[in-house]
Amino acid sequence: MGTKERSAAGVFSVEQPLWRAVSAFRLLTMLYAVGRYAGDAHYYRYPLGAWLYMGVLAAWTLATMRQFSTKARCDWRWLYGDLVLIVIGILLTRAFDSTVNVDSGAVTLPTIRAAATVLGFAVMGGWRPAALSGLVVGLANIGERGAVTSGNVHNIVLLMLAGIAIGYVVELARASEQALARALEIQAATRERERLARDIHDGVLQVLAMVQRRGTELGGEAEEIGRMAGEQEIALRALIAEGLVPNPSYEAPRRAVSAPEPGTPQDLRSLLAPFAGSRVTVSAPGTPVLLPGRAASELSAAVGAALDNVRKHAGEQAQTWILVEEEPDAVVVSVRDDGPGFGKERLGEAEREGRLGVSQSIRGRLRDLGGSAEISSAAGQGTEVELRVPRLPGQREAG
């Protein structure tokens, strides 16, 4: 998951920047170690041997920069090799340096280059491998000194604490990244289920409801077919509602208002015009109301779902008015009828019963577009549905 800038789920990977930091830290600490030794070489008993080790350390660090730049290339063998080279350098310090310098606590040949090794273990495996590698480096320092002193104990504690802290933070970041990827997968799956529920509601459920209604009107065998269609409608609604019950262990984050989907600009008026009839009045601006293709079609489908609800709940004789308005940052479509209306609690009851016309075919569509749907109704006062779709600055002209 951390082998690329972005994980498979499209989430920014926290590991890749850390591996680049490890690679850069190894190079910088190697340069410091070489520079530090160059200034102190004249104090060593065997400077040539120490120079040979520093050359090997520099060559190894430069040759393995590519391996330590990503988790995909760096496995445990490279880390163990790095640790072995550091431990050898620490122990060789006593052989090449003077006894007086060693006993006085002079720095070892690798000096802070050892911290880069511990950092690599922390990023690869977390705080436990980091603590173990820090302990190994600390024991090598004790062996080089030949005794346990307050100075090397202090260095061991600092190195282990730094490795544990970095490793623990890496583990937390990795767990958070996985949780975010999982959350995005759940959100995407939920969006797809809602889209399928809308399609089923707008197609299959409407047909089943019509068959039931017409069968009841015709009677005879048709009434039996209508009854069966009604049973299938109820079962299908229950199935859709069950599939859309949210997971109680996961709360989807609020979706920010996003820009409309890209696509070919489309005049919303041309999509709403077919809805006009003796009982439906469509009022729109005299100039094109341009929206991206998907936004226009989804908004039109939401209007169609609202009209279906009018016919179903207010009756075929209800009068409906569709009003299209353009605002600087949005397109607003209002669907108002003179039907009997309903109480505020009715929407919640309908959703619990599996009737998803409002929650999915209307509100769900607008939510996916980054917009909103507001339903206002009261008993005896009709119903008004206000659909609002945002658009980017300049979209009014360019679409």
Image: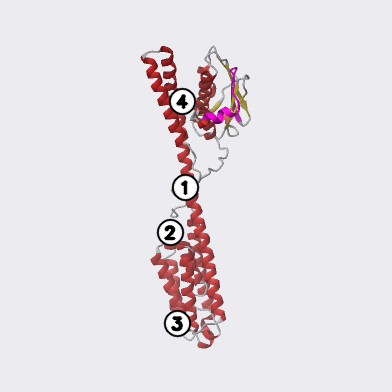
On whether residue 349 falls in the magenta region, the answer is: yes
CB contact under 8 Å: marks 3 and 2: no
Give amino acid for label 4.
Answer: Asp
Q: Which residue is mark 3?
A: 48
Q: Which callout, 1 or 4, points at the residue further toward the start of the chain?
A: 1
Question: Which of the two discs, 3 and 2, sits closer to the camera?
Answer: 2
Residue sitting at x 50%, y 83%: 145
Q: Find residue 37 and report its horizontal and vertical position in percent.
A: 51, 78
- Residue 282: which quarter of the image? top right
Identify the element where label 2 is drawn. loop
In space, the residues marked 4 and 2 are separated at their CA atoms by 49 Å
In space, the residues marked 3 and 2 are separated at their CA atoms by 36 Å
Identify the element where label 1 is drawn. helix
Q: Which residue is mark 4?
A: 202
Residue numbers of the magenta segment: 330-350
Tag of residue 60: none
In space, the residues marked 3 and 1 are separated at their CA atoms by 56 Å
In space, the residues marked 3 and 4 are separated at their CA atoms by 84 Å
Residue sitting at x 42%, y 23%: 230
Looking at the picture, does residue 66 appear above or below residue 269?
Answer: below
Give amino acid for label 3.
Answer: Leu
Could you classify mark 1 by the number of other residues whose Cα lies within 10 Å: few (under 14), some (14-19), or many (20 or more)? Answer: some
Q: Find residue 221 and report its horizontal and vertical position in percent.
A: 36, 15
Looking at the picture, does residue 342 appear above or below residue 93?
Answer: above
Q: Which residue is mark 2?
A: 71
Q: Which callout, 4 or 2, points at the residue further toward the start of the chain?
A: 2
